[in-house]
Image (cartoon, rainbow, N blue to C red):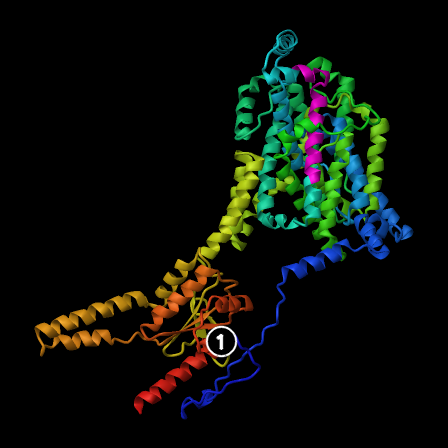
C-alpha cells in the first residue's frame, strides 16, 4: 500500500447468479505528506512565542486581565441592577458561611472573611466566567484543616499546658538536640491561631503556584482524569468527613481533631467515649437551628422560581443566636463555646513561612487539582448555559492568583462553589461586577460588624456547615438512576466515596483516579466482540446478538472487535475470535498433522485397510467458512503487539485455507499496518474501506475459485 492512486481496478466475475457482483471496486487514497521535522516545528513555535509586536503585547495583556476587555463594554443600565442584587445576596450568604467554614479549616473566623473578600476581588480582575462565585468551599477547607491540625501537633501546640511549660523550660536550660523541643520553644512567640493561619497561608501559596504553573505549561488535561462520577463521589465522601468533624461542636465536646487514615472512625469513637460530657445548652441550640434552617432551605429550593431572592435564613439564625447567647450569658452560665473576639480591619501582610514549604508541598497537590478542576468545570458549565465562552487556561491563572495573592494577607485556599454559584445565577448576575459587590458587603462586615459576633456559639456555625452538605449527601438518591445509565460510573462513585470517607480525602482521591483508570483498562481488556450480520437491501452490517432478522453470507464470517488492539487485550482478541468463529486454527493444524501421521502409520501397517480413508476424510473436513472479515471501525489504534497478533491470526488461518480481510480501518491503523509490514507484496488488496466491499470481494474470489475447480 505504498502507492495510492485515485483509480478503480475491475475484477472480472463469472456470469449468472453473481452478475450483480460483476465489478469489484477497489478504492485507493493518496495520503497527505506529513512534515515531521522536529527542528522546523520547534523553530516555528519559538518564533511564534518569542515575537513581540505592539498588537501582540496588547492581546496578551487583555487576555491576561480579562477585566480590561469586558469592563469598558459594561452596559450600566442593563447589567448594574442584577449585579448589585446578586452581589449583595451572595455576600449576605457568604458572611455566615465564611465564619462557619473557618472552623472547618482550623482557623479563626476573621480569616474566613479575609479569604472571601480577597478571592472575590482577584477573580473580578482575572476571571473569565460571569457567573461562578469564588470563595470558601467545604471540601477544600476540610483538606486544609487536616494539614493545619497535623502541623500544629508536630509543632507541639496541642500539648497540655503543664507539658508545654516543662518542654519550654527544658529548651531554655538544657542544650538538647531534640528538634521538636527547639521548634516548640521558638514558636511560643506565635500562638496556636497565628501558627494555624501561617500553615494555611503557606499551603495556599504553594497550591496557587501549582495552579499557575498548570496554566503556564497548559497541563489542564490533568482534570480529564477527574470524571463527573469521580468528583461527585469524592465530594460526597468528603462531606461525611466534614459532618464528622463538626459533630463535636453540636454536642459541645472538647476533643482533639483526628487526622490521617481512618480519621472518620477515630473521631466517632472519641465522640461516643465522651458522649457523657455533652453540653446540653449546645445540643439544644443545635437542634433549634436545624429545625429552622432545614425547612427554610427546602422552601428556598422549592419556591426558587417564584422568589426574587432566597431567604437569607443563615444570617437570620446567626443574628438571633448571637443575641440569645449574649443576653442569655450562655458562655458564662452553661460553658458554651463561642466564636470569641473577631477584630475589625486588616492585619498587615506577611509572607508565607518558607521553612514550612517542604512539609506542605505534597499536601498542596490534591488541593490545587481539586480546586482548579471544580472551578474550570463550573465555569464551562455556566458559560455553555448562557451562551458565552471561557478560557480554561485563564481560569487556572485566575484561581491560582486567588490563592497566591491572598496568602500574603492571612487567607487560606479557595475555589469555585456550586451552591453559591447557583444563587448568584438565579438572582440576576450578569457580569463579574457581582463579585466586586460581594467583596464590598464582606468589607462592611470586616470594618464594622465583625466584633458583634463575639457571643456566637460554635455549634451554630457547625449546624450551618452541616446543613450546606445536603446537596452532596442527596447524591445517594441518584444512585438507582446512575446504575441504570452506567454501572461502571456507579461503581467508581461508590469506591471513591467510600475511600474518601473511610480512609482519607487525599488517599480517597488517588484511589478514585486509579480505580477509574483501571476501569477504562478493564473495559478495553475484555471488550464486546460480536459477529455481524447483513441488513437486507443495504450495505450495513450489525451485531447478530443485538438485532433480529439479520442475514449471513455463505462461507463468510464478519467479526467486529470494539476496542483498540494492544498488548493488554491481544490474547482476548485471539480467544474471542476463535470462540466466535468456532475454529482455532492452531488446533486444526495440530489435528491435521496428527491425522496425517496416523494415516502414514496405518498405511505402513495395513496398506489396503479402510481406516486410511477415514483419516483422509478428517484431514479434508470442511470448516464451514472460507473468509473472515474483521471490522476494525472500533479499533482506534494498534501497538506492536496488536500488529503482531493480526499477523499471527492471518498466518494461522491462511495455513488452513481461510483468508482474513480487514475493513474500515482508520488512517492511524492503516499507517500502523504499513509501518509494521503487515502486507506482503501484492496483498494490499486485502484492506477494504467498508465491510460490504470486503464481503463482495470474498464472494467474488470464492466464485472464481469455484469456476476454476469445475473446469
Whether residue 573 is visible to the viewer of this picture, yes or no, is: yes
Magenta run includes residue 73: no
Residue stretch rendered in magenta on the structure: 185-209
Q: Is residue 545 above or below residue 354?
A: below
Q: Residue at x 36, y 78 (%)?
A: 555
Image position, residue 152 (x, y; %): 64, 22
Location of residue 263 (image quadrant): top right
Q: Is residue 678 above or below residue 83?
A: below
- Image quadrant holding the C terminus, namely bottom left
Please state if 144 lies on the left or on the right of 642 as rendered.
Answer: right
**Main SS of the magenta segment?**
helix
- Write down the residue under mark 1: 688
Q: Residue at x 52, y 39 (%)?
A: 498
Which residue sits furthest right?
Answer: 77
Front position in the image: 47 or 166: 47
Which residue sits furthest front?
Answer: 39
Image position, residue 691 (x, y; %): 48, 75
Q: Is residue 121 above or below residue 392?
A: above
Q: Residue at x 61, y 27 (%)?
A: 247
Front position in the image: 244 or 673: 673
Query: Is disc 1 surrounded by few (<14), some (14 to 19) or many (20+) residues within 10 Å?
Result: many
Amino acid at each position: 500500500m505504498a502507492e495510492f492512486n485515485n483509480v478503480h481496478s475491475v475484477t472480472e466475475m463469472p456470469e449468472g447468479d453473481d452478475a450483480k457482483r460483476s465489478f469489484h471496486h477497489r478504492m485507493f487514497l493518496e495520503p497527505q505528506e506529513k512534515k515531521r521535522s522536529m527542528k522546523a516545528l520547534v523553530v516555528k513555535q519559538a518564533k511564534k512565542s518569542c515575537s513581540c509586536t505592539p498588537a501582540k503585547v496588547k492581546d496578551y495583556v487583555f487576555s491576561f486581565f480579562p477585566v480590561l476587555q469586558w469592563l469598558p463594554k459594561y452596559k450600566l443600565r442593563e447589567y448594574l441592577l442584577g449585579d448589585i442584587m446578586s452581589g449583595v445576596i451572595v455576600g449576605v450568604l457568604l458572611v455566615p458561611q465564611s465564619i462557619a467554614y473557618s472552623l472547618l479549616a482550623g482557623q479563626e473566623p476573621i480569616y474566613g472573611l479575609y479569604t472571601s473578600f480577597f478571592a472575590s476581588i482577584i477573580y473580578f480582575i482575572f476571571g473569565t466566567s460571569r457567573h461562578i462565585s469564588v470563595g470558601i468551599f467545604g471540601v477544600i477547607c476540610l483538606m486544609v484543616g487536616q494539614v493545619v491540625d497535623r502541623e500544629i501537633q508536630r509543632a507541639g501546640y496541642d500539648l497540655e499546658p503543664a507539658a508545654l511549660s516543662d518542654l519550654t523550660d527544658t529548651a531554655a536550660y538544657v542544650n538538647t538536640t531534640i528538634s521538636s523541643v527547639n521548634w516548640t520553644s521558638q514558636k511560643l512567640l506565635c500562638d496556636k491561631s497565628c501558627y494555624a493561619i501561617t500553615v494555611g497561608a503557606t499551603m495556599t501559596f504553594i497550591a496557587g503556584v501549582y495552579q499557575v504553573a498548570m496554566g503556564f505549561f497548559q497541563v489542564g488535561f490533568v482534570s480529564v482524569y477527574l470524571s463527573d462520577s469521580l468528583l461527585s463521589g469524592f465530594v460526597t465522601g468528603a462531606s461525611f468527613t466534614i459532618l464528622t468533624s463538626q459533630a463535636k461542636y453540636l454536642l459541645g465536646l472538647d476533643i482533639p481533631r483526628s487526622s490521617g487514615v481512618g480519621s472518620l472512625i477515630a473521631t466517632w469513637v472519641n465522640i461516643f467515649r465522651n458522649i457523657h460530657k455533652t453540653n446540653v445548652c449546645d445540643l439544644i441550640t443545635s437542634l433549634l437551628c436545624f429545625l429552622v434552617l432545614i425547612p427554610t432551605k427546602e422552601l428556598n429550593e422549592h419556591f426558587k422560581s417564584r422568589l426574587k431572592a432566597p431567604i437569607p435564613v443563615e444570617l437570620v439564625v446567626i443574628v438571633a443566636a448571637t443575641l440569645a447567647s449574649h443576653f442569655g450569658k450562655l458562655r458564662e452560665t452553661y460553658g458554651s463555646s463561642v466564636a470569641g473576639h473577631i477584630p475589625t480591619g486588616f492585619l498587615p501582610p506577611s509572607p508565607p513561612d518558607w521553612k514550612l514549604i517542604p512539609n506542605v508541598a505534597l499536601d498542596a497537590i490534591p488541593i490545587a487539582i481539586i480546586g482548579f478542576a471544580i472551578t474550570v468545570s463550573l465555569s464551562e458549565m455556566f458559560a455553555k448555559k448562557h451562551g458565552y465562552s471561557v478560557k480554561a487556561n485563564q481560569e487556572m491563572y485566575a484561581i491560582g492568583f486567588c490563592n497566591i495573592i491572598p496568602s500574603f494577607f492571612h487567607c487560606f485556599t479557595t475555589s469555585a462553589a456550586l451552591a453559591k454559584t447557583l444563587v448568584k445565577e438565579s438572582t440576576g448576575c450578569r457580569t463579574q461586577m457581582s463579585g466586586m459587590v460581594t467583596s464590598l458587603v464582606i468589607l462592611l462586615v470586616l470594618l464594622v460588624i465583625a466584633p458583634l459576633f463575639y457571643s456566637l456559639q460554635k455549634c451554630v456555625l457547625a449546624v450551618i456547615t452541616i446543613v450546606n452538605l445536603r446537596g452532596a449527601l442527596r447524591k445517594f438518591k441518584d444512585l438507582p438512576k446512575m446504575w441504570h445509565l452506567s454501572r461502571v460510573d456507579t461503581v467508581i462513585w461508590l469506591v471513591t466515596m467510600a475511600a474518601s470517607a473511610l480512609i482519607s480525602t487525599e488517599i480517597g482521591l488517588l484511589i478514585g483516579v486509579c480505580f477509574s483508570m483501571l476501569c477504562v483498562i478493564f473495559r478495553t481488556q475484555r471488550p464486546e466482540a460480536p459477529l455481524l450480520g447483513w441488513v437486507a437491501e443495504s450495505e450495513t452490517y450489525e451485531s447478530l446478538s443485538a438485532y433480529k432478522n439479520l442475514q449471513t453470507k455463505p462461507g463468510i464470517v464478519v467479526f467486529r472487535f470494539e476496542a483498540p488492539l494492544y498488548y493488554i487485550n491481544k490474547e482476548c482478541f485471539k480467544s474471542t475470535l476463535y470462540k466466535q468463529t468456532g475454529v482455532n486454527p492452531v488446533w486444526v493444524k495440530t489435528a491435521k498433522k496428527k491425522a496425517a501421521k496416523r494415516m502414514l502409520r496405518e498405511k505402513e501397517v495395513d496398506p489396503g485397510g479402510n481406516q486410511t480413508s477415514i483419516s483422509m476424510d478428517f484431514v479434508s473436513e470442511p470448516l464451514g467458512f472460507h473468509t473472515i472479515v474483521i471490522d476494525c471501525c472500533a479499533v482506534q489504534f494498534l501497538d506492536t503487539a496488536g500488529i503482531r497478533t493480526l499477523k499471527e491470526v492471518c498466518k494461522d488461518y491462511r495455513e488452513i485455507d481461510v483468508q482474513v480481510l480487514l475493513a474500515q480501518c482508520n488512517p492511524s491503523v492503516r499507517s500502523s499496518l504499513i509501518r509494521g509490514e503487515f502486507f506482503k507484496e501484492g496483498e494490499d488488496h486485502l484492506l477494504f474501506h467498508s465491510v460490504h466491499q470486503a464481503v463482495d470481494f470474498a464472494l467474488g474470489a470464492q466464485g472464481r475459485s469455484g469456476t476454476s475447480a469445475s473446469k
